[in-house]
Image (tube, grey):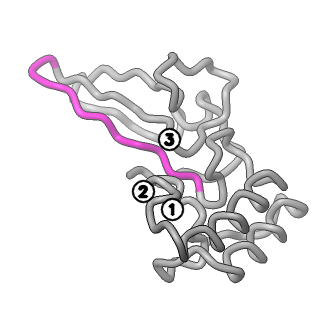
Amino acid sequence: PFNVSRNISKTSFINEVVVNNGNSYKIYNRDGSLKKDSDFMGTGSYICVNNEKDFKNYTIIVKGDGNGDGVVDISDVINAANASVALFENPNVLNSYEFSAYDVVNDNNVNINDVIKMANASVDINYSLD
């Protein structure tokens, strides 16, 4: 996975990431559609790098953004809270990218500590999820 800051557009992402050695790349939404320049980079988006011999996909993870819209908002907080309870019964309720996005305290769990931190980030753009 490729960790990316929240609220970053495709254009800003391209300016921050250097794809060198003549490689070409395309950036896709999690549904496989080509990302527009103004779209936010969200969890599950991916960059496909092609070096003319083969290609490699790198999945984007935005901490706190499990739904893939590139922002941490109340829907992510609710989803993480629901997932934290559901994980007790079904450890596969989240895919690996959603799990990584919602595990904002980096303790290999999704629980109330993550939910609280995400709730703070959802109301304060300057609140750090690092």
Q: Is residue 123 left or right of residue 20?
A: right
Q: Residue at x 90, y 61 (%)?
A: 123
**Residue type highlighted by circle 2:** Ser
Question: Marks 1 and 2, Cα distance to the nearest angstrom?
Answer: 5 Å
Q: Is residue 121 left or right of residue 41?
A: right
In front: mark 2 or mark 3? 2
Residue denoted by label 2:
96
**Horizontal and vertical percent for residue 109?**
52, 78
Looking at the image, is 65 positioned above or below residue 126? above
Question: Marks 2 and 3, Cα distance to the nearest angstrom?
Answer: 10 Å
- Residue 21 falls within the magenta-colored stretch: no
SS label for mark 3: loop
Mark before the other along the chain sequence, 2 or 3: 3
SS label for mark 2: helix
**Residue type highlighted by circle 1:** Phe
Question: Marks 1 and 3, Cα distance to the nearest angstrom?
Answer: 11 Å
Q: Is residue 55 left or right of residue 102?
A: left
**Horizontal and vertical percent for residue 2?**
42, 50
Q: Residue at x 46, y 53 (%)?
A: 95
In front: mark 1 or mark 3? 1
Residues 44 and 58: in front is 44
Is the C-beta separation of discs 1 and 2 under 8 Å? yes
**Horizontal and vertical percent for residue 110?**
58, 74
Q: Residue at x 83, y 60 (%)?
A: 122
For the magenta stretch, what is the residue range? Answer: 52-62
**Residue pushed farthest left?**
53
The crowding category of the residue bearing disc 2, from other C-alpha atoms within 10 Å (few below 14, some 14 to 19, many at least 20), is few
Residue denoted by label 3:
44
SS label for mark 1: helix
Residue denoted by label 1:
99
Name the chief secondary structure element in magenta.
strand
Q: What is the quadrant of the C terminus in the image? A: bottom right
